[in-house]
Image: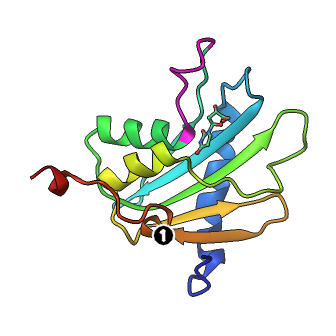
């Protein structure tokens, strides 16, 4: 469900940062680059790209690269995330939106509030915004372990 209530143009700056992040993709196997820009509560932006591996399994998604960078530097409170993708051989970012994979949704839900906006963008300049809880309803959290 697209959140029409959000002012999508307000997140253009974060999409621009995700477009910077995708330039650093290491994706020689899928030829599908992903860039993520994660803004923390102080307004700092953490960039992440996907980093693939010849053994495939150890590959890391752009969103997790960004959040692991931040958390490992002591930052664990976030405001918004933007994601874009690029297919090798194509000009610019993809025309299809790129939603975060299920594993990344679970990792995000550990550190980000359920109402954090996840901003998707495409080549035509369209922006879609989803809340994290829309992308991962009934997330498994620490409280479930109690
Ligand atoms: N990928 C991401 O970086 N983020 C996602 O949420 C979806 C998938 C990457 C993983 C892999 O390197 C490539 O895209 C193709 O699946």
Within 8 Å of ligand 1, the CB of disc 1?
Answer: no
- At x 28%, y 50%, the residue is 76
Considering only vertical position in the picture, is 67 above or below 119?
Answer: above
**Along the line of sight, which residue is nearer the eye, 132 or 18?**
132
**15 displayed left or right of 43:** right
- In the current view of this chain or complex, which residue is farthest to the bottom? 5
Residue at x 18% of width, y 55% of height: 144
Report the side of 104 relative to 6 (left or right). Answer: left
Residue that label 1 marks: 134
User: Whereabouts is ligand 1, in terms of quadrant?
Assistant: top right
Judge left or right: residue 74 versus residue 108: left
Near mark 1 (Cα within 10 A), the count class, few <14, some 14-19 or many ≥20, is some
Q: Position of residue 122 (x, y in %)?
A: 77, 59
Q: Which residues are magenta?
A: 54-62
141 vs 61, left or right, is left
Query: In front here: 6 or 57?
Result: 57
Q: Estimate the x, y position of residue 45 in percent, counting from the top left.
A: 47, 51
Q: Residue furthest top?
A: 54
Look at the image and say whether residue 56 sits in the magenta stretch: yes
The one of 4 and 77 positioned closer to us in this rendering: 4
Query: Looking at the rendering, which quadrant does residue 119 occupy?
Result: bottom right
Overall secondary structure of the magenta section: loop
Question: Looking at the image, can residue 45 be seen?
Answer: no
The image quarter in which residue 109 lies? bottom left
State the residue at coordinates (38%, 37%): 68
- Residue 97 in view, yes or no: yes
């Amino acid at each position: 469900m697209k959140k029409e209530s959000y002012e999508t143009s307000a997140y253009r700056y974060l999409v621009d940062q995700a477009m910077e992040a995708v330039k650093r993709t290491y994706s020689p196997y899928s030829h599908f680059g992903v860039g993520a820009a994660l803004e923390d509560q102080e307004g700092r932006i953490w960039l992440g790209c996907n980093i693939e591996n010849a053994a495939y399994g150890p590959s890391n998604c752009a969103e997790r690269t960004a959040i692991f960078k931040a958390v490992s530097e002591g930052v664990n409170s976030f405001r918004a995330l933007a994601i874009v993708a690029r297919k090798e051989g194509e000009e610019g970012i993809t025309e299809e939106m790129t939603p975060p994979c299920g594993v990344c949704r679970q990792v995000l839900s550990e550190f980000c509030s359920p109402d954090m906006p996840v901003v998707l963008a495409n080549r035509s300049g369209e922006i879609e915004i989803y809340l994290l809880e829309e992308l991962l309803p009934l997330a498994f959290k620490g409280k479930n372990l109690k």
